[in-house]
Image: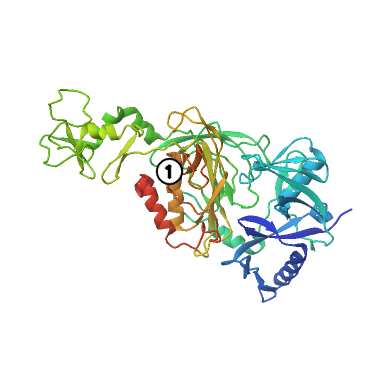
Amino acid sequence: MNRDNIAIWEYLDEFWKMFSVKMCQNIENGYQNYRQGSSANRLKLPRASIDFKTMEYSSQQLIGPGTIRRVVLPGSSLLARNHTWQWKYKNAWENYTAEVNQLIEDHANWNKHQPLNLSQYDPTLMYIIYINDQKSGVQQNKNTGYQRKIRKERFSFKFPTTTDKVTSSLSNPATNSYTTTPTHQQASSARQRRTASRNTHHSSQSSQHYLSNTPSYTIQPATAPSASYTTNSHHSSQSSQHHYSNTLSYTTQPGTTPLYTTSSHHSNPPATSFQNIFSTDPYSSTTNTPALNAINSSSGGKQGLLDKFSTTLTTPPSHDCVICMTSLSDVSGFQTSGATNQASSVIELKTCKHIFHAECLIASMQSGANDSFTCPCCKVIYGVKTGNQPPGQMHWSVIQTSVPGYEPHHTIRITYDIRAGVQTNEHPNPGRRYSVHGFPRIAYLPDNTDGNKVLRLLEVAWNRKLIFTVGDSVTSGAKDTVTWNEIHHKTSITNKHGHGYPDPNYLTNVLNELKAQGVSEDDLK
């Protein structure tokens, strides 16, 4: 028997959440009046309002407007049958979004003996669903193993009906059923087109990208939600040619609705045109960074670095070496070769002009990598600094909301994911395991000119393994764990807990922190 489709309204609170059934009814009634030519595009609600022209939601609890969307489901869907899947959070139960609800329901009906990996559909949902029976199960965090109860519940009210077409294009491979790709094209397609066609050097608007610093760690679902294939292609840029090869992961990310999706291991994915904004073609590159390899192969170690970035002074100035605190005309305290009464070689660094005994400076470099060193006086970095960040994945997408202080720009959401592993020689305790806590970690930037500049520099820092490090956590006290590496990130949209917006100085501050790690606008040229 044919049933009317139903309309679900959701709002973005860092992740998409459903309005209550009663609220959906009120919003849908106002929306239908707006579509029929009502001059009022704003719907007044108790302590809140909806703007259908901009698809935004304002309330007394929000700093600035939040984004909403309308999802149309068929009458045969779980929510149309007055049921919903929920997960337990502390002492309350939270509803899954419309698309995840249907994924779990299809899985419970057709494939419940196998786990459901939600990250196949949304890489920020690092959860595995285990179904016990038709009405209960467990949600397990893929990184920590922490489990929460889930349940299937009945509700008495009915979602509003509509004759509009179902907004679904993401199929469930296990059942050939549907999950929704919610959009708000009814009121904001023009705004999306404007966003999609903005021209930047990095195609950063309305897109999702993946960067990985290991070839074996890319998250690739066993079955893609839509047509799956493998592609090998070459992308030429003005400066170099990179090779891209990967398997299609998925076409859309529930919860963020990016306008196009691409998968990449490289910090400089291919530029796109408006014609391929909606393409599902994946791209990835090799994990090598050409600039780093060139320095590592040609430098000849630390002495090679000194030869490249310093000049030898035949007549040293009459002051002390700041490292060994003896006169520059005397023997270095770290001299290891030659006669002990013979004066040490004295060098001047090319950029900052600070002067040292050559052997003193080499001694100060022993704890660092062979591809760079830092001036002990002024901290200027010579070479390309790299860190000890473990293998992992970085991806980003643009979500249709604004961080406070940067209205009306959309928001770039960055997700970092690193797994536990074993320390190598570049880490403090080789052979010992390192732990991870709080991954995947999510950060936010405004989708404006400065925000995109910071994003591109963060990609450079990620490829140089500078975003995270292995050590002791100042916050938790945990030993041998992955921690932030002095490049601050905004991990919340709002400033409720002091880690979000508004913060008018943040973008300037993080640019300075990146520069202190040797990552600057010169790396974007």
Q: Nearer the viewer, residue 173 or 237?
A: 173
181 sits to left or right of 176? left
Q: Residues within 10 Å of mark 1 (few under 14, many from 20)?
A: many
* Quadrant in the rendering for residue 219: top right
Q: Position of residue 78 (x, y in %)?
A: 80, 51
Q: Nearer the viewer, residue 235 or 32?
A: 32
347 sits to left or right of 382? left
Q: Secondary structure at mark 1?
A: helix
Residue type at mark 1 is Ala
- Chosen colour scheme: rainbow
Q: Residue drawn at (68%, 57%), measured in percent from left and top?
A: 17
Q: Residue drawn at (36%, 39%), measured in percent from left and top?
A: 385
Q: How many marks?
A: 1
Report which residue position mark 1 lands on.
461
68 sits to left or right of 319? right
The image shows residue 41, relative to residue 219, as above or below, that is: below
Q: Residue drawn at (43%, 57%), measured in percent from left and top?
A: 507
The image shows residue 18, relative to residue 332, as above or below, that is: below
Q: Position of residue 28 (x, y in %)?
A: 74, 66
Q: Nearer the viewer, residue 475 or 486?
A: 475
Residue 480 can be seen in this image:
yes
Residue found at the far right of this picture:
1
Q: Position of residue 131 (x, y in %)?
A: 78, 41
